[in-house]
Amino acid sequence: MNTMRLILSLLAAAAMIGIFSQSAQSADPLLAQIKVKKRASDNYYILAVDSKGVHCSKNANGNPKTVIPLSQIDNLQFRMPLGWEDAMALQQARQYEKAAAAFAAIAKDYAAIAPFVDSPSALASYWAIDAYRRSGNYKEVNQERVRAMARNVSLSERYKDEMEIFRAWGHIGSQAWKELLLVVNDWELPLSTSGKIPPPATPPFKPLPANLVSQLAFLRATANEHLKNDALALVDYARVYTVDAGREEGLTRLSMLGALRLLKRHPEISFQYTVQKQAHALAVLFNERFQNSLPKEFDSFLTPPVMPETSADAAPEK
Amino acid sequence: MKHRMTKRLLVSVIASCSFALGQATTVSAQAPDVGELYNKAVQLVERDKNYAAALKETNDIIDRFGQHAKEDFGATFGTIYYLKGICLFNLKQYGDAFVEFERCHKEFPNTLRPDRNASTRANVNNAHWRRSVFYMAACRQREESWGEAIKIYDQFKALNPERGEYDPATLELNVATCYINAGNIKHGQALLDSVIKRRGELRAKPAAVFTAFVALVNGWSEVPAESIESTVKSAHAFLDQNIDALRLSAYDMARYKFNWQIYQGCRGLGNTGMEGLGWRLLGIVPETIRVVKDLQARKQAFTSTNDKLEAEIAVYEKEISDGNPIELFVLLEEARLLELRGDTWGSFAIYDHLAVNFPKAKSRPEILYNATRTAAVIRDMVTVQHHGLTFLSEYPNHKLTEAVSALLLEQLFFNGEYEKCLGIAADLRRGKEPGAPERDLPDFAYGGSLFYLGRYGEAQPEVDLHVEKYPGSRFREHSLYHQAGNLVKLFKYPRAARLLDDFMEKYPESILMDLVLYDRATAHYGMDQLESCVKVIGQLKDRFPNSAVFDRALVLEGDVFQLKEEFNSARKVYAEARAMAVDQRHDETAANALFQMIAVEVAQEKWDAAIKFYDEFMAAYPGSYFEPNVIVSAMPALEAKGRADVALGKLEEIIIVLGERRDVSQLERALASYARIYGEKNGAEALVRRLEKFPNVPVRNDLLRAWLAVTRLNVLEDDANKKKFKNLDAEIKVAYADLKALPMDDLSNYILTKIGQNLLKGGEPLEALPWFDAVRARPNPELRDIATMGVAQIKANSKSSAMNAEAIDLFREIIEVYKTPSLIPEAVLGLGRVLFKQDKWKAALDDALVQYIENKNWGQARAEVSWMAGRCYEELGKGDEAMHAYLNVYLPYTSQIQYSADAYYRAASLMQKSGKKDQAYKTLTDMLLRMGHLQDSDKTRSIAKARDLHLTLARELGKNAEEDLKREKE
């Protein structure tokens, strides 16, 4: 973290949070490695941050205290608090509900340092929201976002896009489909209607990491499904489970089910071989991937469709 | 199958094993110490990783001390062979390494004691005695002798090695890998599963575990076909249990190349029918951006710059910026796997994503092609066009260009994008012979597009060609409809009717049947078969109540009623048609129906109703195709209601608008109507003046100026107006001059031809040539036959034999290609004349003259033709035929002196030459009686020559020529 950013972030935090220790009495003291000018880095327990500087101690009990002026600090890196590894383990084990609760608690306990860029509290907010999203608790996605905003959570550039996209997830909770589409629209590349090449049926998304594209596609698909734009929704559900190579299991599962729902009500499912083949392929892939947990309503898709005979005089489709 | 082992077991215990053997007592003080040599070798291995140099050292030690090693050093000397084995192992000489390890173990057991140097009893053990067995197994593993490796690993375990001697995790992973590679997937997988579950206890390194996992993935793809199902099930279960434990950081996946190994493994799974499993595993490969983020996070742990990390970040960032990072290949493979499984929507989504997000991909052409193809399968026509046209703009000459064009063309055509079709179809068929299989689709689409765009004149030869050349085409049904339907549009009803009837018989269930019935009804109407027209309309209404042409059929029905003057029925049906067309937003049909409703009211002199509909039309359909007709039609009503001048003014505005729109057919009709009405009202001369100074003509609208000039000419050249102009010829000349002054591009074929004919008639053939050539050069075939005739005539009359030869080809073109009935007699005549001129007697007869003579109703130049025929026969030595031909000149066409006089003379000459002097004399007498008083005006001087011959024959026959002529006269 460069020096200027650190100082500004510390000053901003100091302006906003006052005495650190008052707001974090229930939390374990937070350890940080501080590099003071012309000295080697050392570990300190952070007690408070204000305009005078960082109030800290070498001991967890806070004694003796020392104050390091902000102007003397070259670098400050927080160590992750206790409980962080457990929370992360839960996240990686895909126990999202528990992970969300654990991260939310950390975010709350260390709320005072939320304005520090990528502080443990700020990161915990991010992970909590992500875990809520993955667990399907969209209401809490919204609420945790609001809490994060209230705490002035500061995250570095690499989290910005995802935090913005979390905003859209909140709309699923409130079932505001048109509003959701509008939010998703902000992430789309504008369609060019001038020139000789017509635009595609749906606007592509801006260049983003695949997981974010996948999330946006899911949001757009969900909105379109509820707005009865089935053809658009079907392609977007396909985007969800493919562009990120199915990395996020929850999204993959939800999107394949979404696609299956749409295929079930597709106007040509009873006679169009391509559509039937698609439904069959998805049903079989789903069962294979998710331990034969295909919902009963799609059981008929497990039977392979019959390929129609071709005729030499068959008229091409109008 | 290659197996990569980690190098983890390059055990550094070598360095800890100091070789303190002491000296052999007989060694001189200057000889190298074995311990020093050994340590040197160890340093080369440990510090320098210079295995080749270390090998030399160990060989040196063995050379110096090996012969009596057992006696001098006992078991400990086995360490030398172990070290040598390590060097060979790292130099990948596994067979040789095995020998050394085996030697270490078998020849230097710890029971071996040196015979001498009792003082060096310490450190006599072979520290690597057990470990060398491990390495023996490792060698066999490297040599892919899996079974033997497993046996030797078991032997190693049976030796109860101590914890510090080996890494238990590595041992178990190696054994698991050997089982897998030996084909015992079940057992190998179970062993690996066990290691993963005990990874903490075993302190297994994640990368080593993953290496074994890669072997398992490859092993899955090699199971026999009958085991695939059970393998897939068990593999998914394994992944469900262990996928999280297996995960490495993005950077580790990249730097150990595990990402590429998994990618290859997934390809293998896809090739053996395990697409779903392969798809799942592809998700393990992280995107390169994640690798970069991983490295950036590691960088943050350092307070100062870490050059190595920076360099690594730069490497991966370059992979992204170069445009071909691993995720591109992962996605391509995913698309392949999903499509193999039948998930076309999934594969489309991927190709679509790749097309946008990987613009620099080397495989971009294939990506765009597949995006186009899969979009077509899922029938997203809009995106088909997007990707297809993107491909064509970026890769106009790629090996896939034709395939993309064909895909795009078919989709565009059946999606109604006819303008786009024309360009693509033209490109696709360029350079290919008609009838070539690759031209089937583009020829079909080209002709069909012209048809649907209303360019009927251009369309007919195209649709005819497709029908002729592609009897087996999968577009046959549509093609036959286009052919027949287009003929209806060209008003060629008899042929259209036959073809439509054939179509209905051949394709009774055609999806085009409603259109076919509508066209058939139109053909009936065109041929005044009104009852049949109504009957067919009835069939259309019964069978296709939801047809898109239902409203048009109603209008046609109304037209029948109107023709039969059943106005009430007509009114009702037109109203119904109008309501339906308005509802379906068929504006043109609605406008047509309303126009007809005006005509019905005017026919019954219901002026108020007519004016009401007129005003409704003008409000709803300004600028419509029918607007000029509506004004003309409503004129009686407008005149009755005192609005005629306004209507004429409106017509003038319409003419300006049509000129600006370059709508030639409408403009022509509007001007014709205007000319008629204005002329009737104000007289021909006033009309011509008005057309000369037509109000509000835009300065640069040459097209409009041309048509105004043509309209002027039509008035001037009308026989009915001959006496209405003082200087008619001058006016006509000026009008043509005005036309010729305009750019050719703005003049229609009709105008160009008109100018050419005028120049030709006016005796300026060479000036006419460029006008006719301009028509011939245009893609629009309208009047091309007439222009060709013009050019042929010009070239036929030239003195140049090269031009004459061209004329012959052009006349033949008219006769054999165009086959225009009205032009054929003239073309045959022209051909005959040129061939005659070139002294090609036989060709003139065979190709032209005989045919002309046989067509009795070709009356234009019979005298000339028969005379030429006579001349040809004469030249060919066929005297009787020549005489017969001449007879057919002078008897029926005596008054055509230029031919009859010569025919007479020549016939008489032939008679004389064949000895029929008396007959010759009589013929000449007859001739001179009829035309003897006339002067020879031609070059042949036939009368003078006849007179001479007559005298000669008189002498020979002892007759008195003068007296015979007098007597016959009397």
Image (cartoon, coloured by chain):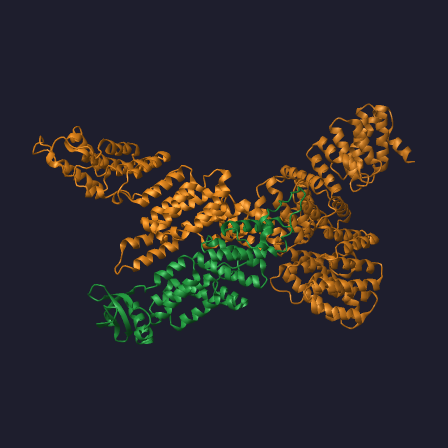
Q: Position of residue B836 (x, y in %)?
A: 71, 35
Q: Nearer the viewer, residue B32 or B404?
A: B32
Q: Chain B drawn in what color?
A: orange
Whether residue B108 is visible to the viewer of this picture, yes or no, is: yes
Question: Farthest residue toward the left?
Answer: B29
What letter labels the chain drawn in green? A
Q: Position of residue B105 (x, y in %)?
A: 25, 34
Task: Tell me if residue B317 comes above or below residue B799 in the rendering.
Answer: below
Tell me the quarter of the image containing the N terminus of chain A.
bottom left
Whether residue B283 is visible to the viewer of this picture, yes or no, is: no
Q: Position of residue B880 (x, y in %)?
A: 80, 27
Looking at the image, residue B638 sits to the left or right of residue B793; the answer is: right
Q: Nearer the viewer, residue B308 or B366?
A: B308
Q: Position of residue B809 (x, y in %)?
A: 66, 38
Q: Nearer the viewer, residue B242 or B257?
A: B242
Quadrant of residue B666 within the rendered picture: bottom right
Looking at the image, residue B481 sits to the left or right of residue B377; the answer is: right
Task: Tell me if residue A97 comes above or below residue B853 in the rendering.
Answer: below
